[in-house]
Amino acid sequence: MRILIIEDEQSSADRLRRMLEGEHEMVGVCASNAEVKDFFGDASHADVDLILSDIQLGDGLSFESLKTVPTAIPVIFTTAYDQYAVQAFQFNSIDYLLKPIDSEELQAALEQVHSSQFIVHSSTTDAISQILASVKSQTIRYRERFLIPHRADEYLIVPVSDVSHITIRDGVVRLCTLDGKTHALNMTLEEAESQLDPQRFMRVNRQFIVSATAVSKLSTYFLGKMRIQVAAFPTVEIIVSKDKVATVKRWLDS
């Protein structure tokens, strides 16, 4: 099959390539909605059998560009989040795989497409449009505050707007505020990430979720990496991998 990959993290795109090489033809990798639109704007690129697409790109949800795909090309979504209208994916017979992608699950999905068991009830364009409308019509409620145990009989209420970053250190998740205070948080970093508005907060590496309003400076680092500095904790070193630098820059520039 001729497969187009839509993925804005180079490491994830490379991993998909390795899992597919030898059996399928990779026709390209698009890292943004703009690149997807440019790709399908070229008539010679219309001959695509399957799209493997991340959902959350640096310039928005991939639904925005996929709804313009001119032909009924099956789409398998690859995402770290399961909050984006998964029921709509299933209803429209559009498959999805949660990251990190399991090779056996990917192979099973590809076999469904190849054996024609993967049936698109309407065109991919129509299906994507329905999903996009569904997502936009939903009111997604993100966390607005944290309740932090303070003393034996007291709690602190910390508004999300006061959060600088959330980090894990020595196995303990800590919430750090814009006034320079730190509190232990009784949840995993993954749980915190799923409950925060992705326009305001980003998981920039394995150890840190950062608030856009807290970032005071970006600077280059070794081997193409980037250092983030937050105003309330100037000595804290937050390093972004080379693969994620462009994504973080687009997020902060939005």
Image (spheres, rainbow, N blue to C red):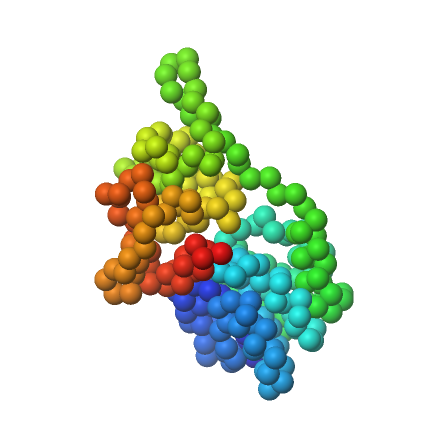
Q: Quadrant of the N terminus?
A: bottom right
Query: Residue at position x 25%, y 65% from top?
Result: 223
What residue is drawn where x is 37% and y is 61%? 245
Q: Which quadrant of the figure has residue 50?
A: bottom right
- Residue 13: x, y in percent? 44, 68
Name, please, the residue furthest toward the top. 153
Task: Please give left or right for residue 30 compared with residue 175 in the image.
Answer: right
Up-down: is 99 above or below 125?
A: above
- The residue located at (36%, 47%) in the rendering is 215
The answer to whether one can see residue 105 in this image is no
Q: Is residue 36 above or below residue 137?
A: below
Residue 184 % position (x, y): 36, 30
Residue that protrudes farthest toward the right in the picture: 122
Whether residue 153 is visible, yes or no, is yes
Residue drawn where x is 70% and y is 49% of the image: 137
Q: Is 246 rendered above or below residue 3?
A: above
Query: Which of 137/83 is in front?
Result: 137
Q: Nearer the viewer, residue 213 or 226?
A: 213
Q: Where residue 135 appears, x then y in whole percent?
A: 66, 52
Number of numbered discs overlaid on the protein picture: 0
Q: Position of residue 204 (x, y in %)?
A: 38, 51
